[in-house]
Image (tube, rainbow, N blue to C red):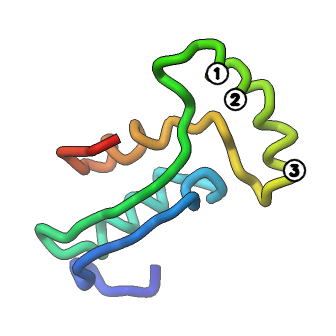
Amino acid sequence: LPLADKSVDAVVCTLTLCSVVDPAISVAEIKRVLKPGGKFLFWEHVLSETDPNLAQQQILLTPNQIKRADGCHLDRQTGNVIRSAGFQALDL
């Protein structure tokens, strides 16, 4: 992102991390530009962790979804990516 470190109060991300090439890099950039105490607000679809049948369908449908929906992956574990970047107190 073309922003200075710790320069923004909030980042809003809606149905974006499913389509970027490398979500970990994107989330690291979000973390970099947020001021201490800044808010990261996101709304993303993720691979189901509670319904194995739905998760299997998401995995099977992802290759076609990528082609039809500008690179959208139905089977990403975005919550894990966000946690790995050091964000805490997530409301998933």
Circle 1 sits in a helix, a strand or a loop, which is it?
A: helix
Where residue 3 appears, as percent x and y from the top left, is: 37, 86
Give neighbour class at mark 1: few <14, some 14-19, many 20+ (Cα, 10 Å). Answer: few
Q: What residue type is labelled 2?
A: Gln
Say which label, 1 or 3, has the lower sequence index: 1
Q: Which of the 4 quarters of the picture holds residue 58?
A: top right
Q: How far apart are marks 1 and 3 (CA)?
A: 20 Å
Say which label, 2 or 3, has the lower sequence index: 2
Q: How far apart are marks 1 and 2 (CA)?
A: 6 Å
Where residue 82 appears, as percent x and y from the top left, is: 37, 47
From this view, report whether residue 19 is shown above or below residue 66. below
Residue closest to the eye, 22 or 17: 17
Q: Do the residues labelled 1 and 2 touch (CB within 8 Å)?
A: yes
Q: Do the residues labelled 1 and 3 touch (CB within 8 Å)?
A: no
Residue receiving disc 2: 58
Which callout, 2 or 3, points to the residue nearer the camera? 2
Give neighbour class at mark 2: few <14, some 14-19, many 20+ (Cα, 10 Å). Answer: some
Where residue 11 appears, as percent x and y from the top left, is: 35, 72
Give neighbour class at mark 3: few <14, some 14-19, many 20+ (Cα, 10 Å). Answer: few
Residue receiving disc 3: 67
Circle 3 sits in a helix, a strand or a loop, which is it?
A: helix
Indicate which disc residue 13 carries.
Answer: none
Residue closest to the eye, 51 or 90: 51
Which residue is at a point 87% across and 50% down the rendered structure image? 67
From this view, report whether residue 48 is shown above or below residue 76. above
